[in-house]
Structure formats: C-alpha cells, structure tokens
C-alpha cells in the first residue's frame, strides 16, 4: 500500500471541510477521486501534498505514519501535485522549470548545457510533446501540465495527484494526458485523478472513491460500479432526478441576430431566441461559439449584422450597452472574466448593480445587504456568509455567484458560455434547474456547451457551428452523432 488516509478531519473556522476522509492508493494504480464541488476532494489532496495539515486522522505513507507540513516535505517523500492552474515560472524555459528548486549548482553556477541535456533525455524517454529550450509562457495548457509531470518524474515522485487536468484541454490534448498517465501506471507510479468529466472515467481509472459532504461514502473497483450508481453516490439521489427538464411553452422572440459577421471568426450568423427557450450552441473547439457570445454582448466589434431585443433594433458596441439592453453574459472562465476573486461574495453579487443601490456615489448599505442575502438564500450557496472571499468557494458555488450577479441586475436575456465547466454533477443539476426557472419566468437563454449529453438534454433547439458559420439546426433530444456530423463534416449554411 502506497498511501492510506483514515478519518481525516479539517475545519476552517466554523466550516467543516472534511469530516471523515478515507482513501487507500496502491502503486501502479489510477485511483479516481470523485464528488461534488465542496465535497472535500481538494482539501483532502492538499493535506496529502503538504499544502495543509489535518486537524484529526491518520496519514500512512508506505505503511508508516507521516505528516507533511509543506509541499517540499511531500515532494521529498515522493508526492507531487499537478494543478489545474499551472504553478510554473512562465518566463523560464521548459528545462529550467523541470529542475526549478532542484538545480545542482557547480561553484555557484547552474550548468545550463547539462540541464538542457537531462531535460531532453527525460522528454524523449516519456515521449512528451515538448522542447527543452522553449519558454513555458509559449505552451498550451496541456503543454504546461506536461512540464509539471516532467518535474514530478525528475524529482522521483512515486505518487502523482492530478486535479482536473483536462478541464480546459482539447480532445487531442486530453488523449495525450491519458497516454502519459497510462505510461506512469506501467512504471509503478500511483496516480490520484480528480475529474468532473464522467465520460473520462472508463478510459483511465482502476479504483474510485467518492466523497460527499466531507465524508468518504464509497470505494470500489470502477468496473463494479455503473455510471448511475456513481452519480447517486456523488449527489445522494437517483440519476433520473439530476437531468430532468420540464417542457415550457415558447413565447415571443426576445433576441434576434441577423447576418452577424466578424471575419474570419464569425460569418453571417443569424438566430432567434424566444422567451421561455433554451437555445443550445454546439460545435468543436475553435468553431466560433465563444466569439459569438462576445460579439452579441459587445465585447468584440461586429463588422456586419444587426441585433434586436424584444423587436427593437439595438446598437450594442460595448458590454455597458448590452447590460442596458437587458443582456447578461456568464463567461466560460468565471475566475478570470466572471468574478473578482479577491472581493467578498456579497460585493460580487452586486457588482453589476452598483448604480441601483447607490446614491450620489455612495452605496446604500442596507439595500446592498438585502440583495446579498436574497441571492445567497435563493441559490443555496454554501459559504460562511457574504463576507467570505469568492475565490475561496468551490467551483459550483463560484458559478452560482457569477449567475447571481446578473439575477440581481434583473437581466432577461442570458448568454451562458460553458455553464458547467469544472463543476460537479450535483452543481450542474442546480445550474440547469436555475436556467429552467429563468425560462419559466420568460427569459431567453443561449447556452454554449461542449458537453453533448447536457446540450441534448437541456436545450430546446441546438444550432451547430463550424469555422465561424452555422451548419444546421437540430431539436433537443437529438443524438450526439447528429451534432458531430454537423460540427465536423457538414458545409456551412447562410
């Protein structure tokens, strides 16, 4: 047994992040760690990686009790963590990052030639698609993860923890990560793999442990567990209750886009979104889906085309004008463009409504508190209170705050760009329920998603894009094959 965790507990002030965390990992095994956001997965792994210490419980490393008080302690024992967001030095080369902190200086100087040679040998040995001399800032997200894996291998790690490694990768990049993980497994390295992408599980996992509300609720061989059973363990209810959608009568056209063009990214896009409707936008990475949302919301200039809101032509040349027209944009990268991570939850909720809760340049604090409390309660956000920093929330709760910001603004047309990226199945169900509730109230929703099962089950209609053009329309409930045919093979229509 490589790693054993028994009864791990961790509290942060009045919030209990872990109640009873239990996990066992063997050498040469890929162990999946599953659970909703806020279930305690990241906290448990940070304890293993020496980033935090447990309040109670026992950690055994290679059969002996151990406590890691820093990432260096864990690394020296043979444990490394590959983070979702790269922690590399972007201005240094791949080789310099691989050896960072472990350079073997000679008379105070690091022999660059030897460093490059050793890095090249390691890269060739594992078949990494990297060049030792390339600067890290020039790499793709997948490339940066490869560098972190190289560092772990070079430092002699026998356990690697992967935290959502493929959440922002293309299909080809994801396959490359899988290849590397499989190679590590054959060399006897233990792997703990955290993911919310359920379709990845059968490809990569051997064992699975599920956390819910800070407790380990299930451990078994992945082959012995159906997908429905896994979801039930994660969310505490049957899978049929997670993806249910009620039919809603479609109303008037709320948003109409005609001939929208921004070559070469967008070419003659025309669409309508009705009150009570969720219009899905499908397509492969690079098809122009995010660019469409940005153009409609006034972030990127439209060279040709027209936009109507509730039958009235609107000139939307900036996000300010889009907000004034009643539009809301929930971006695909909530941490960079959707939220102010360094501000409290409450201030993020009111961020788009400051003009409504202020007078003569001063905030009316009573109104601000009322808005904060209203949406924290309405969306059932798991937090210590409105003063907690939004950057310390789980991904699913951060997404709720990103949506609450626009609900507080009374928006009526919503652009959801990858609304469930990086959140667990339970949080996804809550986001979908919220979208359905908005539709019932007469809102018009345009939803971009790369998750085809979600697109099929949630959208009333699906428009498919390829290379900046629309290639066709499909009804909700269509097949993944129909979407992929339009996304990959069908010629554009104008």
Image (cartoon, rainbow, N blue to C red):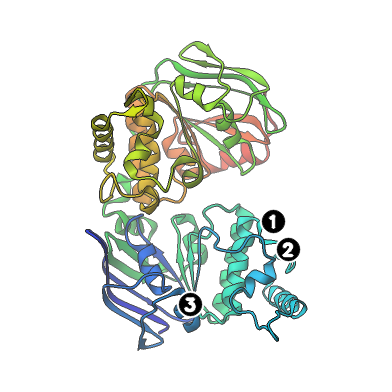
- The residue at which mark 2 appears reads as 134
Helix, strand, or loop for circle 3?
Answer: helix
- The residue at which mark 1 appears reads as 138
Is residue 350 in view from this perspective?
yes
Helix, strand, or loop for circle 2?
Answer: loop
Q: Quadrant of the C terminus?
A: top right
The CA distance from mark 2 to mark 1 is 7 Å
- The residue at which mark 3 appears reads as 72
Q: Where is residue 19 in the image (x, y as percent from the top left)?
A: 24, 66
Residue at 63% x, 26% y is: 301
Residue at 36% x, 52% y is: 393
Check contact, mark 2 vs mark 1: CB within 8 A.
yes
In the rendered structure, the answer to whether residue 14 lies left or right of residue 264 reads: left
Q: Where is residue 401 in the image (x, y as percent from the top left)?
A: 36, 41
Q: Which of marks 3 and 1 is in front?
A: 3
- Quadrant in which residue 99 is drawn: bottom right
**How many other residues sit within 10 Å of disc 1, few (<14), some (14-19) or many (≥20)?**
few
Going by the picture, which residue comes out furthest to the bottom?
64
């Amino acid at each position: 047994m490589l790693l054993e965790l028994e009864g791990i507990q961790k509290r942060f002030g009045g919030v209990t992040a872990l109640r009873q965390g239990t996990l066992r990992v063997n050498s040469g095994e890929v162990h999946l760690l599953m659970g909703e956001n806020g279930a305690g997965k990241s906290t448990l792994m940070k304890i293993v990686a020496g980033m935090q210490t447990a309040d109670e419980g026992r950690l055994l490393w290679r059969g002996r009790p151990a406590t890691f008080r820093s990432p260096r302690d864990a690394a020296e024992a043979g444990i490394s963590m590959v983070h979702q967001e790269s922690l590399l030095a972007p201005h240094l080369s791949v080789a310099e990052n691989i050896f960072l902190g472990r350079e073997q200086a000679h008379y105070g100087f690091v022999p660059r030639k030897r460093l490059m040679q050793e890095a090249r040998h390691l890269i060739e040995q594992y078949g990494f698609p990297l060049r030792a001399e390339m600067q890290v800032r020039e790499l793709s997200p997948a490339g940066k993860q490869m560098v972190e894996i190289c560092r772990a291998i070079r430092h002699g790690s026998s356990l690697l923890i992967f935290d959502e490694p493929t959440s922002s990768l293309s299909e080809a990049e994801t396959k490359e990560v899988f290849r590397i993980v499989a190679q590590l497994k054959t060399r006897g390295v233990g792997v703990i793999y955290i993911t919310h992408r359920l379709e990845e599980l059968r490809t990569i996992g051997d064992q699975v442990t599920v956390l819910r509300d800070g407790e380990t609720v299930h451990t078994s061989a992945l082959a012995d567990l159906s997908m429905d059973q896994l979801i039930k363990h994660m969310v505490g209810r049957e899978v049929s209750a997670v993806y249910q959608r009620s039919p809603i009568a479609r109303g008037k056209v709320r948003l109409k886009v005609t001939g929208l063009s921004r070559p070469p990214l967008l070419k003659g896009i025309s669409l309508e979104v009705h009150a009570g409707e969720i219009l899905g936008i499908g397509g492969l990475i690079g098809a122009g889906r995010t660019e469409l949302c940005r153009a409609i919301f006034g972030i990127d200039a439209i060279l040709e085309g027209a936009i109507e809101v509730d039958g009235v032509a609107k000139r939307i040349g900036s996000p300010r004008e889009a907000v004034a027209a009643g539009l809301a944009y929930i971006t695909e990268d909530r941490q960079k463009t959707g939220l102010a991570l360094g501000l409290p939850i409450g201030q993020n909720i009111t961020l788009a409504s400051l003009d409504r809760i202020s007078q003569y340049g001063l905030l009316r604090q009573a109104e601000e508190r009322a808005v904060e409390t209203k949406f924290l309660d309405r969306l059932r956000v798991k937090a210590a209170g409105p003063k907690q920093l939004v950057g310390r929330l789980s991904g699913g709760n951060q997404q709720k705050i990103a949506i609450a910001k626009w609900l507080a603004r009374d928006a009526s047309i919503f652009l959801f760009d990858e609304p469930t990226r990086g959140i667990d199945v339970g949080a996804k169900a809550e986001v979908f329920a919220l979208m359905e509730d908005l539709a019932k109230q007469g809102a018009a929703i345009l939803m971009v998603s790369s998750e085809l099962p979600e697109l099929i089950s949630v959208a009333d209609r699906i428009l498919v894009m390829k290379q900046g053009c629309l290639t066709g329309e499909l009804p909700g409930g269509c097949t993944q094959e129909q979407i992929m045919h339009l996304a990959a093979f069908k010629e554009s229509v104008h």
